[in-house]
Structures are given as C-alpha cells and as structure tokens.
Amino acid sequence: MELRNNLKELVFEKAILKRKVYNATKDTFELFRKTTREIIEAFQNKSHEDNVDILFEFKDRGDFEFEVKFAGDVLIFMMHTNVFEFSRNHDVMKTSYVKDDTSRSYCGVIHIYNFLADSFAYNRYNDLGYMIGRMFVNYENHYFIEGKRELGMLYNNFNTAKVTKEAVLEIIESAIAYTTNFDLLTPPYDEVKMVSVAEMKESFDRKMIVTGKRLGFRFQADTD
C-alpha cells in the first residue's frame, strides 16, 4: 500500500518534532536531577560541619520523578512524558518567536510541587500540596516558567532563555527559597471545631484535619 505524501509527511514530521521535544525535556530533567542532588549534598555537608540536626534528603522516584526533603518540606520534581501544544489564545502563541516558527510552541513540561514532609511521614493522605511552578521546554532547548513570582518568567523571554546549568541552578534555588518562605497557616476555627466519634476513632491525623499551607485560600491568589 502506498502512503499519500501529505499524510506521510504529516505523521513523520510531527513524530520527529515530538521526539526532539521529548529528548530536550528529558535532558533538562536529568540536569535538574543532577543539580538538585548536588545542592542537597551541599546542604548536608554544611549541616554536618555546623553540627545542625536538620534533615536534607534526596530520593529518586523513577525515571520521571524525584523528591527532596528539607526543614519540614518536600519538593517533588515531575516530568510529564507527553508533549503539549498551547491553545491559540495563550500568550506564548502571540510572541514573534513562535509566530516565526510554530513548531517552537510544542513543549515538554516539568512540574514542581510542594508538600509538607509530615504529610508523607504520617500518611495524611488528605493533605494538600501545591504546584509552585512548571517549566516548558521546546526542541531548541528554549524554556519559560509559569508559577509564583519568584519562579515565573515573562513569555517574551522564551526566545532568549535557554536551558543551562546556571539557569537550572537558579530555578532550583528559587523553588527552595520560595518553599521556605511559604509558611503553614492554621485553618479557620469553624472548619475544625467539630469532629465525629467515627472520625476520631478512624485517625485524628489522617481523616479529620486536611493540612495545607494555604488551606481555605486559593493558592493562585496569594500575594504574600
């Protein structure tokens, strides 16, 4: 059976593009993994030198995920295995960089989540975590970040921002700094003042109180 040229070109061109994007994103993720491990080792060495009892821990969770623990917090870095395109109304589609070559808008994604370390230690499955940023990488190794102001970039930097060790280091340090300053707030009294006997018997920590750093507020609206 002979394939029509236009169909063959469409399928092969899109598949090759997505493979390039995937490879660029995976390389970036491995750079994140390596650099994060180095940062945590530096914290561990400093903690040992100063005789300070603070946990700093790096843990691989597979090919597309790793986590770090520090001072009561957990950051989870997760790479999505698929390649994404932006909607035509997204700001990145309005940049000259993408208008000149629409294939540049196809990106892989790396997410950065923040959780409380105790949520995992005590199996508090109802506790909340927050995505503090996500990094988009295209086949040219250009990137931009959506997230809190400490991490986020303007879309018009997409044409100049390239993945480097220095850029990745800055992003990781910003994520750690933001997480450290992102404090746990007590939930409103009226949300936790009553508890049933069944909930108490089931487990106070696991079932009654959902713990999150900004419980009761939309994280996206935080300006602190």
Image (cartoon, helix red, strand yellow):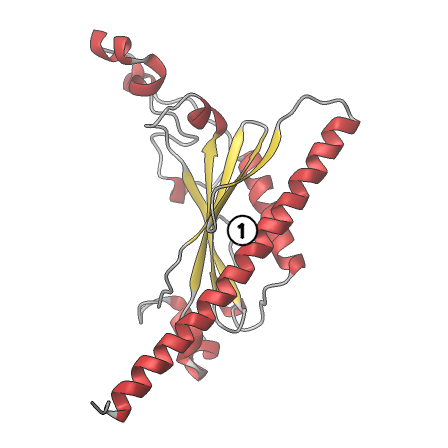
Position of 65 relative to 119 (above/below): below
Q: Identify the residue shown where x is 56% and y is 44%.
A: 175
Residue 101, position in %: x, y? Answer: 44, 82
Which residue reaches farthest right? 49
Q: Is residue 45 left or right of residue 62?
A: right
Left or right: 9 in relation to 150? left
User: Which residue is at 28% across, 9% downward?
Assistant: 200
Instruction: Mark yes or no: residue 114 visible.
Output: yes
- Viewer-proximal residue among 84 and 170: 84
Q: Is residue 29 above or below residue 43?
A: below
Q: Mark yes or no: residue 154 visible.
A: no
Q: Position of residue 6 (x, y in %)?
A: 27, 90
Q: Is residue 80 above or below residue 92?
A: above
Q: In x, y percent, where is residue 39?
A: 67, 43
* Residue denoted by label 1: 151
For the image, the number of numbered tags is 1
The quarter of the picture where the N terminus appears is bottom left
Q: Residues within 10 Å of mark 1 (few under 14, many from 20)?
A: many
Amino acid marked by disc 1? Leu
Left or right: 55 in relation to 115: right
Instruction: Name the residue located 40 percent from the left edge and 36 percent from the top edge.
Output: 129
Residue shown at the point (37%, 22%) measured from the top left: 187
Q: Is residue 58 above or below residue 84?
A: above
Q: Which residue is situated farthest in the front direction here? A: 1
